[in-house]
Image (cartoon, rainbow, N blue to C red):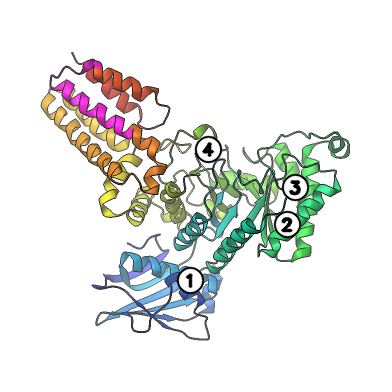
Amino acid sequence: MIFPKPKHLSAKGYFSFADEIRVSLSRCMGLSSAPVNTVFGETVTDGNLLLCIFREDSLGEISDEAYRTELCEKGGVLTVSLYSSSEKGLIRGLFALRRMTLKNEFPIGEITDYPSFSVRGYIEGFYGNPWKSEERPEMLRLMALFGENTHYYAPKDDPYHRNKWRELYPENEASQLKALVDEAKSLFVDFYYCIAPGLSMKYSDDGEFESLKAKTRQLYTLGISRFGLLLDDIPSDLFYEEDKIKYGNAVNAHVELVKKYRDFLKTLSPDVKLTVCPTSYRGKGTEPELVEFASAIPPDIDVFFTGSDICSKEITLSEAEIFNKNNFRKPLYWDNYPVNDAEMFMEMHLGPVIGRDPELFKGSAGLISNCMEYFGCNKFPLITIAAYLWNSEDYDPEESFLEAVNFLLPEEEREAFILLSDHCRTACLHDENSKIMGEYLSRASVEFQTGNRDLAVNTVSVYTERVEKAYEIFRQYSEKPLYKELSRWIKKFGLMCEIMKLSLKYLEGAKVREELIEKMSDYNESATVLTSFCFREYIESVLGDD
């Protein structure tokens, strides 16, 4: 299966290579090989995959990221013709071909494809430990591979983004940032640097704005031409007396700051773009502070909005249309999933994104997903989000999640991860947590109630064996970065395994009641969020079965 699903696929069958796949490049019309090398690495001329690249202007009428591929196989040689009206479309088509290569699954026929959302990306905008410098380019490459085209850099605990916003980046940090910007450009990913001065800025002080300008000039010299000005998570009232006298309220101060900053950015280059996050960034889109702010700033500025809540269960087209009507622009959604900071820090969000309207792209400027500090864990939900953003009308959450698991993990770890992630769906999305466990325990409950005690015990035993095997996998690979990130949840998962085994012994007549009660007490005292109520309900029924 091609993933994410293309808009149009006409295939008479699928082809796979028996041996290692190598790429041979045939260029036409003076096209640079740089995009091919970015996607595939160095090409070889004696490979068994012949890649022919062309350009076709008509696809630009659909989207500047549209592409068409024709795949033909003859005698074990695959010929691929790729048509595009721009290098953006070319890179998306090449990444699609790369995904086929990684799966070794090629549809023989024709694909015409283009994204649902024009702006598709993620933001490092969480509270907590920022990602490591070597992790950021890895995430850029992964998200580009799955069709995303935008990255916002805004880690709350990067001091130069927020607390030390006035200070220039030291040479080493500036060099790392430039390397990240260069990587994004090579992948055709728009890189936005966000700055958040609102906690301490005195808006009436011209010197403060000069500091903002100096910081921005440094960033511009690093190759950054897209900026974010974040005014979220700050007091709604002005702090300094001078600001109160000059502006009266925070909205007036923020409007002037945004206008001045936008005008300054245009002196650097007319192509510079700006996104702002207002202090009022959630609700119905009709909030007075938001409307007053958005109606007063230039229409070429994108405005972040999280939807009906900070972490919205659903985001719908009708909500987007209300925002557009009242704020004179389409909302750019800052989607707070899979982030798990603040009061969510005991949760782990591994499940696929749900609750996003299949037609949301018609009324929004785009969608940017806020990430967790747990770098490796992000990849699973983010791949599902990328699939939604590319083809929202044909998005399947569970299918996308399994694609992510199969892509990211070796075969021997997949079953274990699926069983753990079954218990890690507690989130703002209100996804069904512990669904796999719930199905087993519900079946066992029916069997108990209808007098089939042995059958019920066997049902519980089958699930217990599965989770035991999973826990052994986690112990075997405990030094892997992914499982280190998940250590708190794996520890509680292990305790759950012990309790399940004790419950079986108790049902078989062993005198382990007090031990079972003690282990369950330890489990309940742990604040780490794992299983749903079905687990506690099962243990209570076992203990009450005397």
Residue at x-position 64% and y-position 41%:
281
Q: Which residue is mark 3?
A: 295
Cα–Cα span, label 4 and label 1: 34 Å
Q: Which residue is mark 4?
A: 341
Secondary structure found at label 3: helix
Secondary structure found at label 2: helix
Q: Chief secondary structure of the magenta span?
A: helix
Vertical position of residue 7 compared to residue 324: above or below? below
Cα–Cα span, label 1 and label 2: 29 Å
Secondary structure found at label 1: helix
Cα–Cα span, label 2 and label 4: 28 Å
Residue 117 or residue 372, whichever sits in front: 372
Residue 274: x and y in percent read: 69, 56
Q: In the rendered structure, which disc, 3 or 1, sits on the residue that comes first in sequence?
A: 1
Residue 81: x and y in percent read: 40, 79
- Residue 435 seen by the camera: yes
